[in-house]
Amino acid sequence: MRVACLGGGPAGLYFAISMKLRDPAHDVVVVERNKAGDTFGWGVVFSDQTLGNLRANDPVSAATIEAEFAHWDDIEVVVGDHVERSGGHGFIGIGRKRLLNILQDRARALGVRLEFETEFDTDLSRWADYDLIVAADGINSRIRTAHEDRFAVDVDTRANKFIWLGTPKLFDAFAFLFEQTPAGWIWAHAYRFDETRSTFIVECSEATWRGLGFDRMEQADAIAACERIFARHLDGEPLLTNAGHLRGSAAWINFRRILCERWSFDNVVLLGDAAHTAHFSIGSGTKLALEDAIKLAEVMSRPHVASDRAGMAAALAEYQAERHVEVLKIQNSARNSTEWFETLDRYIGFAPEQFAYSLLTRSQRVSHENLRLRDPAWLNGIERWFGARAGANDDAPAAPPMFAPYRLRGLALANRVVVSPVLTYAAGADGVPNDFHLVHYGARAMGGAGLVVTEMTAIAPDARITPHCPGLWNDAQVAAWRRIADFVHARSDAGLCVQLGHAGPRGATQAGFVRPDRPLERDGWPLLAAFAQPYLPDGQVPAAMTRADMDAVRDAFVTATRRAIDAGFDMIELQAGHGFLLSSFLTPLMNRRRDDYGGTLENRLRFPVEVVAAVRAAWGEERPLAVRISATDWAGDAGVTPTEAVAIAAALRATGADIIDVSAGETAPDARPVYGRMFQTPFSDRIRNEGGCATMAVGNIFEPDHVNSILAAGRADLVALGRPHLADPVWTLRAAAQAGHDIAVPPAYALGQAQWKRTLQRQAEAS
């Protein structure tokens, strides 16, 4: 095969090497517009996994690279005078220029032709007689740009400014250095990559960048200013640039996330940063490029690929399919990391211990238990700090954050685990909870959770979702709930919360396990909503609420609140999310009113806030009140946005809500949720740390590791799990046994818990 590789960075060189290794008869040329020794980066960071892939692909170059790696183990986070240092991270790095030299030498030895200081045409006509044209010309790829319609390029330009510098100061840890200036916070990512130099990337928000005058400085002046800002970390050493040819503020960059829907057309294929980018804060760009090169060389070296158009197309499709998955994983982590630095103001006020923990876990690639494996002593200190702040006894052993106590007004919770409200459709037509509910909620309370929240409980017969949903509008229901509350309080340490709600436009439907949100075929009832719009296009049309309707619904919430007191509940959560009645006011997708209750967010909040205020007055000052909201409609600017959700939560808190249960979606049938592990936690994080509201995180959280990471990083105050508790009522007891933590357990089950703890500890030691 004749191959033209356009771009002589690590991706292009390593692909050429990989091709020649598979078949020395391949005719491969690498064309690079710069000189052989030019490079515009400083250090390259690798993981052990990447190094293993290099060893398997080319032991010779891998051995040379490995011999010149700089190794370091620690991460150091410095904010002001406080230093948090965590070990066990196992970084390896090498100078980018040295890496290029090694790859160039290896390519020449294998017979690759290298042509430097050679421009290449974007119309690709010069390479018409080559079997394969590889565009490996980096993040600013001319080939990709010239054919962006064929590659379906998606570019996301990020908010922060950064400049890539070096320094003779040798850092003995991967250092994150935060400095406060009159214009705002600025920070450096610094790490040693050989025996003489360290990378020193300076980053800040654009507002800080402009406030410090960097937009008006020549590069030399900007570097001098950075030397002054970070002088105490540099120990008199200078900051250096290898982009001195850039004038003015051009050396400062906004990172661009590149993603292509298609990586090839005809015999042209993208490689490395030309096809995709990953933010420098997770250091995976070169890793992805080299692993791309390995896979592309594998598929291109199969028999008859060059001579068979269908074979070529199939090989390129396989290359993209496999690598695209890996790229998305890294880009998702990179997005999390990028957004953390872009929203630094949320976290910079944390205690230094929590700030460092939040930084280390920002990408979600590093979790709580992963940190325990890396540096158990440091994590032990974090757990002690978290427990002490939560009010744990001074002599109590360190415990995972999920087992720290939490207080909401007069309610003291033994731990931070919440059984999330999950609809069961198990009540009779009278809405009275029965033995199923006693066993269901009783089992989960005895299972160790700090708080159990009931399914949505209707405030009136016409407020139900289905005929099989429980209610709290009559004395028989109060007595049945009282039976459950008395059992929970007598047999466990759990608090019991009732979620009160009105189904609104989602009412009078069939059970969720039959035909969710489909109208009852008979015996339905009239519906109410903010606006006369059905929840589903073919659903029942609700009546737009009049002021008299609002008064009646508000009063029904108040009456149900008083019944909740009689029933013995410890806490109330109001359902104001997921397209139910209160939610139908909050979201513009469902609220198209033209009066004082529609239009602006202030107007849309008016009735939900009125209900919260009335419930707070009836509930009293000593009992806690939560509100569940949908923090996004997953509909872009047309619906509730995360920014609006912060304002909604702040208004609810100001009215008397103690904690916001942060969920998302279910307000529009054409919404486009972005699912994933802990996918709704970022909304909780934002509301908590921008809006100053205590929050409860929920949404595809299913492991103790998730819970501990969320809490320790300050992303929520409580964590709710629904489906895991459906599968395992003793989920929290199991997590305690796994952690070796002693937790209150019903006396009849104590022997089983002790055996469980011993067994799981032995299994952990064996593994």
Image (tube, rainbow, N blue to C red):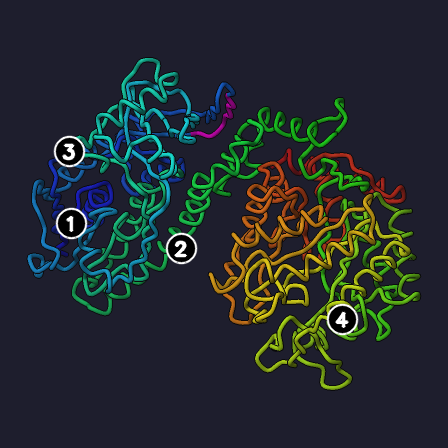
User: Which is closer to the viewer, label 2 or label 4?
Assistant: 4
Q: Where residue 140 sits in the image (x, y, percent)?
A: 22, 48
As measured in the structure, the alpha-carbon distance from the residue carrying label 4 to the one carrying label 1 is: 66 Å
Q: Where residue 369 sits in the image (x, y, percent)?
A: 59, 37
Residue 325 is marked as 2
Where does the N terminus fall, quadrant-wise?
A: bottom left
As measured in the structure, the alpha-carbon distance from the residue carrying label 4 to the one carrying label 3 is: 69 Å
User: Which is closer to the viewer, label 4 or label 1?
Assistant: 4
Q: Are marks 4 and 3 in contact (CB under 8 Å)?
A: no
Amino acid type of disc 1? Leu
Q: How many other residues sit within 10 Å of disc 1, few (<14), some (14-19) or many (≥20)?
A: many
Which residue carries the number 1 mark? 6
As measured in the structure, the alpha-carbon distance from the residue carrying label 2 to the one carrying label 4 is: 45 Å
Q: Is residue 41 magenta?
A: no
**Image check: 212 left or right of 407?**
left
Q: Which residues are magenta?
A: 83-90
As measured in the structure, the alpha-carbon distance from the residue carrying label 3 to the one carrying label 1 is: 23 Å
Q: Earlier in the sequence, mark 2 or mark 4?
A: 2
Amino acid type of disc 3? His
Q: Secondary structure at mark 2?
A: helix
Task: For residue 552, say whether it is visible.
Answer: yes
Amino acid type of disc 4? Ala
Which residue carries the number 3 mark? 245
As measured in the structure, the alpha-carbon distance from the residue carrying label 3 to the one carrying label 2 is: 37 Å
Query: Residue lying furthest bottom in this view?
Result: 522
Amino acid type of disc 2? Val
Q: Are marks 3 and 1 in contact (CB under 8 Å)?
A: no
- In the image, residue 603 above or below residue 7: below
Which residue carries the number 4 mark? 463
- In the image, residue 65 above or below residue 262: above
